[in-house]
Image (spheres, rainbow, N blue to C red):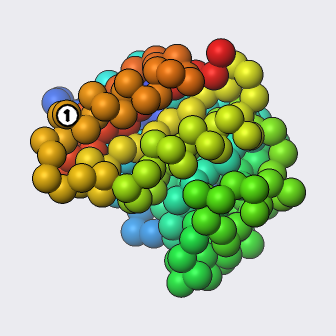
Amino acid sequence: MRQSRFPGIFEIKKKKSSILLTKNLTLGKIVYTEKLLKENNKEFRDWDPRKSKLAAGIVKGIKEIGIRPNDTILYLGASTGTTSSHVSDIVGKDGFIFALDFAPRVVRDLVYVCEERKNMTPLLGDANQPQTYAQFITPVDIVFQDIAQKNQTEIFLKNTDLFLKKGGYALLAVKARSIDVTKEPRKIFKQVRKELEQKLQIIDEKYLGPFEKDHTLFVCKKN
């Protein structure tokens, strides 16, 4: 095992691939179906790119994610906590995650994850209306969004405008079919890029196939 090119993320190299891992913040406990691995008296969680768009982007070779230990993060579309729990491992006990989702059923599961992880708090809210939860959010170093709505780019820009610090990173997982099922995904990604460029600096973008069909991860920076 070795440190990857990103802080807080580790990897085991195989012949034609690599296994991603994060150091487990809650020893002996898992969040979904990940495997635990121990090495040098430390415990690590296997990070499956088939279940995490951020992990898929890293495996596909994205050049930057911006997430560092001690960062404060607004995670939009946290669902049951699969990816956000790995981000929790990365930022560590001195970082913090505001984990937001609009579905009460998944937030109930997310609450249990956050009870174990003291650097996460669950929020039930509509990311399309950031003013309704603004009182609970401090300025953040990172905005990460994974939301399947038609106006997902607009939602992303609203939240980065309100909460992201200058120089902060913003990651958007775009679901082309949620925007328009009649258009080619490539045309949708091109349009999203145009909209993002009006407000943010685009650092990189990666198509997430074969892990996620018709998805692209954009990494942006606030000037």
In the image, 129 versus 175, the foreground residue is: 129
Coordinates of residue 78 in the picture (x, y in percent): 55, 60
Disc 1: CA contacts within 10 A as few (<14), some (14-19) or many (>=20) = few
Residue 158 falls in image quadrant = top right
Identity, as a three-letter code, of the amino acid under mark 1: Lys
Left or right: residue 165 compared with residue 217? right
Coordinates of residue 113 in the picture (x, y in percent): 64, 70
Q: Is residue 153 above or below residue 177?
A: above
Left or right: residue 168 compared with residue 148? right
Is residue 17 in sight in this rendering? yes
In the image, 22 versus 199, the foreground residue is: 199
Coordinates of residue 75 in the picture (x, y in percent): 61, 51
Is residue 22 in sight in this rendering? no
User: To which residue does mark 1 refer?
Assistant: 187
Q: Tell me which residue sits at (54%, 48%) in the image.
A: 155
Element marked by disc 1: helix
Q: Is residue 207 above or below residue 49?
A: above
Q: Tell me which residue sits at (81%, 39%) in the image.
A: 139
Left or right: residue 186 compared with residue 190? left
Left or right: residue 163 compared with residue 65? right
Count of numbered marks: 1
